[in-house]
Image (cartoon, rainbow, N blue to C red):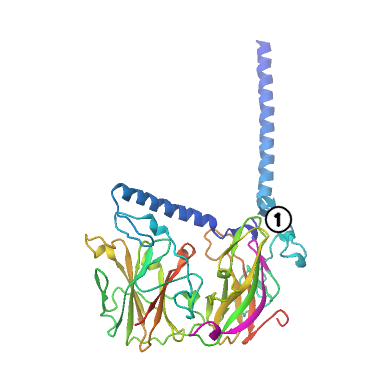
Amino acid sequence: MRRSARTAVGMRGAGRAMLAVVVLLGVTFATSSCTWLRQPQCGGRTMKSPPPSDEYGTPDEICTRGDVGNQGAIYRASYVSDADTQERRLGDPARFSGYTTWIDGVTLVPASRYVDGYTGAYVRVEVRIFNRDADPQSGGARDFALWRVDEGFRRADFVGAPDTLADAAELESGESLAGAVYFYAGDAHGDLFVRYDPDAGAIFASNEGTGVWQVIDNGHGLNPATA
Amino acid sequence: MGSDQRAGFRGRVGSCVLLTLIVGTLALAGCGSAATGGSGSRVGAAAVSSTSVPLSVLEVDEPNPLELYPRRPGAQSRDVERRLGEPVATGAGDLTVVAVFRDRSPGTATVPTSSTSISVPNGEGQSPARAAPNERAFAPDGAEDSSELLVVVVRSGILPVEWLSCSLTVVSDGSRFEPFTTQEHDRATSTGSSGEGAGASELVVTFAIGSAQGPFDVSCTFEGGMAFFFDVRGLWRVDA
């Protein structure tokens, strides 16, 4: 009887020790998982710091962290920015939602070149989109809109020009898409801005970011040299 | 998840879930109708009835901007250009302009459609104009004048017409008219047992065009959350 009582006590001790080990392992696993989950992920990997800006648009930029908003830093109250808006000058990229996106140049094109009805001009902007996500993403002209304070937004026009950026194309990881986006702007007076919003309309998008560039300054097309 | 990377989904998860639900529901409905001898369907035409939903309603027409009407103002990449009477497959049934006419007495028009008449009461039951804010900017506004109306009846096969947004563009100068009034009309309540087109709903849109001269381009698309899933815009030329 005494021996079996000791055996029972010993088994209970071993059970408690095993339970303690299991609990300890569980807590360790849960803690590490939570830490891992809290960190931004990219294709199962933790995102890296971005490379120098001259390496944007290269494989070194894939799975790197985006930029934060800079509400009012450049355009003050001229544009309706919010905390997630990345205000940029022409030639400088907006970096969010797995894309790095540039507007490299702006020209005004007479509307009569493409259309019989309209007077005035189209604003033609040269854009470049780089997918720095680990997965494919779609991007194209539909992500851009022209804005003026008294008009609101206008989505991209289709004019049939051969250099037109695709409306929505699938971009593989590390792939770029470049082309021109046209917006009818009539007489194009005042200050005009182009908004980039690749997550517009997405149901479960967690990213509220947008990018914005001023493209027309009081009726004149801006370019990186003059912006 | 950081504020940056993964939102690049662009709502694909949501798209998949919703589309799966829609496809699944329609597929089940289609199977059901087949089992009960449901009507056949031709490609691109949603012969929708209360007892059958053919899978052809899931078809989406390829956009063809400027193909039928070159050099027109206001074209977008998502435009599906059609001649009057021809349907546009939206991925959720067809969209068709079934009637267009001018009217000089606002509020008392009687709209002749293919199989039913709709009386448009004087103000009662009508809705104010529904603008498409992302399309209106920068185009010159048409001079709204209710002395003469252009009445357009648009039929939607599956999606309710309350999600529709239509506008009118004067081809000669690109000026745009938003609806002066709109009124929804459920065909199921007026076609009785004859069946044809039952289940579809119609939107009666009036544009206050005054003395504006055609031709006009009528464009209609689904707005709001539906625009992400069914992002095509039907466009028909009207020589009224």
* Residue B91 image-quadrant placement: bottom left
SS class, disc 1: loop
Question: What amino acid type is highlighted by mark number 1?
Answer: Met
User: In front: B171, or B118?
Assistant: B171
Residue at point 69%, 65% (across, down): A67
Report x, y in % for residue A64.
71, 59
State which quarter of the image contains the N terminus of chain A.
top right
User: Magenta region: which residues?
Assistant: A94-116
Does the segment drawn in magenta span residue A98?
A: yes
Q: Circle 1 marks a residue in which chain?
A: A
Would residue A38 appear left or right of B208 to someone viewing this image?
right
Q: In x, y percent, where is residue A43?
A: 66, 52
Q: Is residue A180 above or below residue B91?
A: below
Residue topped by disc 1: A47
Principal secondary structure, stretch drawn in magenta: strand
On the image, the x and y values in percent for residue A196 come to 60, 70
Along the horizontal axis of the image, is B230 left or right of B85?
right
* Quadrant of residue B52 within the rendered picture: bottom left
**Relative height, residue B35 to residue B108 (above, below):** above
Please identify the quarter of the rendering in which residue A82 is found. Answer: bottom right
